[in-house]
């Protein structure tokens, strides 16, 4: 379980204001909610604030969100502490989130974790390298189980990893490169690694599959 820490006072900025770009996104977001229900936009606003502030949320941002949405500050903080996607302390340029839930664990997430420990010396949640480049947070299922094990880095997910591929990925980032995300074994989508195993006799020229053509139309009324 991740324990959400709040940044010490010496790391907290004295103020936090919306940029013009954030304000525009907020205005557009709030239009999607009925009048009087703007508190439901708390997650989108946390996301906007975090992106504005180098991927973490200072207390001043929590307070501004509460004021913007006319809701108690503690309610905003409750949401921010519940979801692992929100950081309440500063994180590195590259935020590494390896998934270690059962499918990724069965497929070798321990190799990904070991590699992060060996190559970056990161052993616990929210540990950051001394150069401020990499932060680690072990997370639960990222919804890409078919291509396990996976590692999310900032907004992108790297799939089908092992120790060596993770090491290569970290080295690429250290070199200032932006490696292509998705499957590291070059499989398409979530297709089995040796190619498709179902609907393989179906050609485009066949039109709709026979089982679909035989389906009775749903009764009307
Ligand atoms: S278990 Fe890792 S992505 Fe689902």
Image (tube, helix red, strand yellow):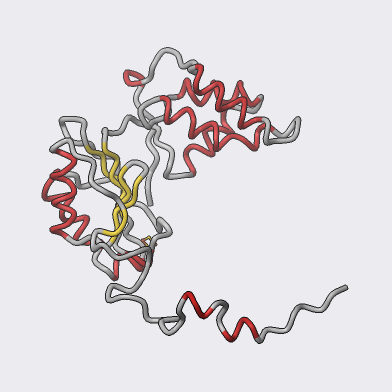
Direction from residue 173 to residue 126 in the image, left or right:
right
Q: Nearer the viewer, residue 120 or 209?
A: 209
Residue 75 in the image, given as x and y percentages of width and height: 59, 34
Residue 98 in the image, given as x and y percentages of width and height: 30, 53
Which image quadrant shows ligand 1? Answer: bottom left
Residue 213 sits above or below residue 32 on the image: below
Count of numbered circles on the image: 0
Direction from residue 63 to residue 199 in the image, left or right:
left
Quadrant of the snapshot with the C terminus:
bottom right
- Residue sitting farthest toward the top: 14
Direction from residue 100 to residue 133 in the image, left or right:
left
Residue 210 in the image, given as x and y percentages of width and height: 58, 86
Residue 146 in the image, given as x and y percentages of width and height: 37, 67
| Residue found 29% across the figure and 50% down from its top | 181
- Residue sitting farthest toward the front: 205
- Residue sitting farthest toward the right: 221
| Residue found 21% across the figure and 55% down from its top | 113
| Residue found 47% across the figure and 27% down from its top | 49
Residue 102 position by quadrant:
bottom left
| Residue found 37% across the figure and 81% down from its top | 197
């Amino acid at each position: 379980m991740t324990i959400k820490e709040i940044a010490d006072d010496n790391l907290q900025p004295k103020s936090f204001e919306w940029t013009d770009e954030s304000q525009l996104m907020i205005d557009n977001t709030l239009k999607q909610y009925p009048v009087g229900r703007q508190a439901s936009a708390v997650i989108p606003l946390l996301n906007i604030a975090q992106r504005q502030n180098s991927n973490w949320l200072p207390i001043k941002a929590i307070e501004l969100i509460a004021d913007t949405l006319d809701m108690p500050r503690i309610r905003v903080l409750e949401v921010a502490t519940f979801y692992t996607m929100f950081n309440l302390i500063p994180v590195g340029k590259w935020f590494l989130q390896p998934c270690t839930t059962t499918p990724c664990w069965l497929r070798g997430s321990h190799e990904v974790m070991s590699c992060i420990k060996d190559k970056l010396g990161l052993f616990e949640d929210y540990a950051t390298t001394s150069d401020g480049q990499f932060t680690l947070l072990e997370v639960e299922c990222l919804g890409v189980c078919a291509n396990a094990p996976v590692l999310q880095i900032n907004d992108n997910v790297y799939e089908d990893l092992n120790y060596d591929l993770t090491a290569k990925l970290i080295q690429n980032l250290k070199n200032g490169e932006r490696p292509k995300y998705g499957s590291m074994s070059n499989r398409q989508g979530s297709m089995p690694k040796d190619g498709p195993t179902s609907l393989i006799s179906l050609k485009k020229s066949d039109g709709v599959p026979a089982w679909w053509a035989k389906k009775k139309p749903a009764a009307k009324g």
